[in-house]
Amino acid sequence: MSEAIDYKVIGTRPIRPDGVDKVTGRAQFGADLNLPNMLYGRVLRSPHAHARLTRVDVSKALEMEGVYAAISRADFPENPSDLGKNIMARDKVLYHGHAVAAVAAKSLICAEAALALIETSYEVLSPVLSLDEAMADDATLLDDECFTKNLPETPDKPSNIAAVMTLSRGDVEEGFEQADVIVEGDYNIPMAHQGYIEPHACIANINESGQGSVWTCTQGHFEFRALTAKVLGMNVADLKFIASEIGGGFGGKTTIYLEPLAVLLSQQARRPVKMMMTREEVFRASGPAAGTHCKIKVGARNDGTITAAKAWLAYEAGAFAGAPMGPGAMAVFAPYDLENFHVEAFDVLVNKPKVAAYRAPGAPQSMHAMESALDELARKLDMDPLDLRMKNAASEGTQAPYGPKFPAIGLKECLEAAKVHPNYTSPVPEGAGRGVAVGFWFNVGMQSSAEVHINENGTVTIIEGNPDIGGSRASMCLMAAETLGVPYEQIRAVVGDTESTGFSNVTGGSRTTFATGMAVIQACEDIIGQCKSRAAATWGVDEDQVEWEDGQAIPSPGVNADVKPLTLADIAGNAAKTGGPLLGRASLNAQGAGASFSVNMTDLKVDRETGKVDVLSFTAIQDAGTAIHPAYVEGQMQGGAAQGLGWALNEEYIYDKDGVLENAGFLDYRIPVASDLPMIDTQIIEVPNPRHPYGVRGVGETPIVAPLAAAANAIRDATGVRINDLPLSPPNILAQLDNA
Amino acid sequence: MGAFAYVAPSSVAEALAVLDEHASLGKRAQVLAGGTDVLVQMRTVDTQPRTLVDIKGVAETNRVDIGATETFIGAAIPSAVLNDNAELKALFPGVIESADLIGSTQIQGRASIGGNLCNSSPAGDTIPALIASSGVCVIAARGGNREVPVEDFVSGVGTNVLEPNEFLIGIKFPNPAPGTADAYLRFIPRTEMDIAVVGAGVSVTIDENGTCTAARVAIGAVAPTVLLVTRASDALVGTQLDDTALEAAGVACTEAASPISDKRGTVEYRRKVVAVLCRRATAIARDRAKLRVRTKVR
Ligand SMILES: Cc1cc2nc3c(=O)[nH]c(=O)nc-3n(C[C@H](O)[C@H](O)[C@H](O)COP(=O)(O)OP(=O)(O)OC[C@H]3O[C@@H](n4cnc5c(N)ncnc54)[C@H](O)[C@@H]3O)c2cc1C
């Protein structure tokens, strides 16, 4: 850990400002708002995974008593984007659950009954349900116009491979020749869902001329406004988007599903329209994480130096292009300083819902493959798995596989901490196995805006544009308190709607505390500048003769002014006389988001007769740069561990042969329940990000990356059998143990 | 959620009258106990209108009666209440532990054994335990009560022998003979809030020499209805309930099972695990029985 800076408020753990309303049920989530004369919207969904939609006729539904609007493809602008086609099917339905029509009616029961009156005809096609099928030469095509992108030459025939990507350095073949030991593995992971507790919900209130507002559960209301306007050919300035409180998103609420439908229905019905997905709809028709097939080959010298590494990574995009193969490919070798590597990645269409972001999109799958292969490599080399990683670890100055040189990063610090952690130094419990793995995520910056208002009593109101998913309002208040030098309790942060603050990109990419935090800090500095000039005017000195210290303006050392320091409250109270209210603002496109690395370790026990896994312990160690609110950083680490373990052990999309999802509910889509997990132990490492005023790195995504391989490696350790395919569910484990 | 009417009769006669009236008019009535199955179904798979006949107010369905030779457990008693009954727990640890596995603390505030049995799922957790302990259904019918052994009650997936104008009042059990104890185990991939992939309920009786003199083994979630596996019982009776005997009983369960492959497990998996659970549950029942050879539970 580098030198500790003495912060006053950063690093403390105040209670969250939204806590009371959340635990008392007052907080308003997506489905909680009701408006007078409101209607309920419901969606008719495709019963087929792949079919030509030859007819949709909503006229009978429109005639039904209590029905106020009904829409289908005919109501949408022509030449739709993929997003537009995903929102409402056009000539084809591409997954079971694809929207084909929607109605708005006086009650949910009435709306459901109206759906039954919508007439449709389909010409059923055979569904493409696996990567192998989709990538085969003679595959059934989802899209006849899909010509693989990024090949040296545009291919002469269409395929289901929407795009490819390659990354390489050095000469891998040569590197493998230098290797004393080579390991290879072939790993499959089925689609998984983020499993956020709050289903998608929104309410639109739009007038005849297409103006109005949308209240919605979102990770980014500005981007939802942009996407909705685009799909409907509307003007963003006519639409106000308000973000509700959010019950989880994890990337799944960075894109739209219901909003354009609700807007169009409301506009036709001239009434507010509320739409809520059922849990089943969330599973069938939102955006899960890509299923993958990854092949890895790694070679090393006897001393553990990796001489070459190769990855072949295929990602299921679902119905439309856009699987996270890029980040998956860029992440797969990111923790290591490699001379020779080659990565090939594929974005592949299949008849499943269009995938969306899920924490560190693409990385858990590809890094599960790499970290599993490294575990095998350590075994072959008879080397401690942490030592093997340390031997090859990237550090400041290492050129990342995706291009830039890393500035200060904390991988080695995490590995060092792991090596001496009790979860690593203690004996492995009887009958259990221990696994370790490394995690990584790039993190992003992007655009953020913030305003800081100084109220007349000197208290502070921050307005920013990022829905608060993980406690960011509290973190904004902490950074503002540190910058302004006032107590945390005097500061409130609110998430403004699209008409009350400047544009901000989504709460995603682990960017909010970093980028929006930077905007808040700059807006506070703007306030400090203004306060100094107000103080200078009051005292009759030059502006550069005033300093800001501990929340008050004081004369600079050596300035001979016999004055009393002015606090924020003093200046605010006197603002009318010194130029009016104090309003600070900043907007930026943040650069320099620092990558965050992690090391996870876990002890697992396997019941050899049933294949059931017990998680005995789990430790997450991660570089947070600077932990603004350590409890929320730990919360991110624990949440990511829980989700990663769920993905590793039991979560999977199970399809029947017709492409119907068989487990569209939490009974059979098995996220871990509380009693399935031990207390997740955390250790925050702080290697400050040189590109952020307080050293912040994003922390929200890295935590889900390492648990997949850590669990797989622990099961390998416990049983002596390497199981390559996830989930490590009891039937999978028992079958593999019995085959071994 | 589908439309519904609600009535809450306060006696067996009143409840029967409501059911009878609906049956004769061809109208749908459905008995409601804790509602932890019914309400979920009304919101999802079965939204057709009906009259809910809430039997929780009928005294007999809430009665626990531990007699000299027989014990009666009312059909509508929430499992949380059963779990708190130390005497019942001592008598039928397997039955009570099966009720204690249902759902979660919240669900157990409502979920009843009667509801579990009448829902008639192949995976219902209490059913194998009820069968192992020789439970008998006491059914309210127009001509007076009739009785049906639990193993003959469920007729298929989600169906049972109740007529539309009948309902279950409770289950009665012979009190365990000296040296008798039961146990129930289920397999789920999680630790709670899940549905049995396989279940096994076992009751054994041993004599002073440790020899098994009687046994009943019932297995769940491996066939359309819970199965009483007499060949497993046969494999146990006359033995010391040693590993060989347990192994043989397990094999009998594997052979009796006719599971399906579905999202919860494959045929192969269920066949293997049913043997494991049979062995493990038998061992637990045996160890409990050993403590009771000389002391009658009641
Ligand atoms: C979250 C959750 C978790 C669950 N976990 C489990 C579990 O782990 N194991 C398990 O086995 N089940 C589980 N269940 C299912 C359910 O809780 C149980 O089957 C429970 O025992 C049902 O009891 P109830 O009193 O709520 O029945 P109800 O829902 O009231 O009734 C169930 C059915 O039985 C009928 N019925 C009820 N009582 C009578 C009667 N006296 N006479 C005639 N018919 C009657 C009803 O008409 C209905 O068809 C779970 C359910 C939920 C929602």
Image: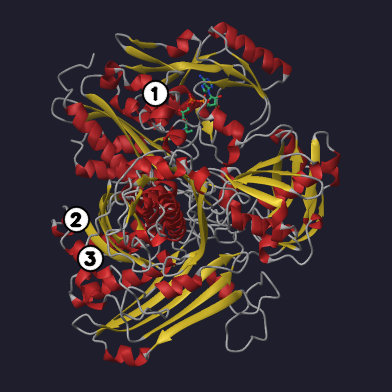
In the visual, does A494 lie left or right of B213?
Answer: right
Please give the residue where the numbered disc 3 appears in the rendered image: A2
Residue drawn where x is 56% and y is 50% of the image: A218
Residue drawn where x is 29% and y is 31% of the image: B183
* Disc sitting over residue A335 in the figure: none
Q: Nearer the viewer, residue A394 or A137?
A: A394
Q: Nearer the viewer, mark 2 or mark 1?
A: 2
Q: Name the amino acid type tagged 2.
A: Asn
Crowding near pointer 3: few (<14 within 10 Å), some, many (20+)?
Answer: few
Where disc 1 sits, the SS reads helix
- Assess mark 1: CB under 8 A from ligand 1? yes
Q: From what the image shows, is residue B66 above or below residue A106? A: above
Residue drawn where x is 85% and y is 43% of the image: A60
Q: Name the amino acid type tagged 3.
A: Ser
Q: Nearer the viewer, mark 3 or mark 2?
A: 3
Q: Nearer the viewer, residue A342 or A684?
A: A684
Q: From what the image shows, is residue A264 above or below residue A399? A: above
Please give the residue where the numbered disc 2 appears in the rendered image: A423
Instruction: Give a yes or no on whether discs 3 and 2 share a subunit.
Output: yes
Q: Nearer the viewer, mark 1 or mark 3?
A: 3
- Assess mark 2: CB under 8 A from ligand 1? no
Measure how far apart labels 1 and 3 are at the Cα level. Answer: 56 Å
Residue A401 at x, y = what percent? 39, 79
Where's the C terminus of chain A, which quadrant? bottom left
Residue A685 at x, y = what percent? 26, 60
Q: Label 2: chain?
A: A
Q: Label 1: chain?
A: B
In the visual, does A155 lie left or right of A649?
Answer: right
Where's the N terminus of chain A, which quadrant? bottom left
* Disc sitting over residue B79 in the figure: 1
Crowding near pointer 2: few (<14 within 10 Å), some, many (20+)?
Answer: some
State yes or no: discs 2 and 1 in contact (Cβ < 8 Å).
no
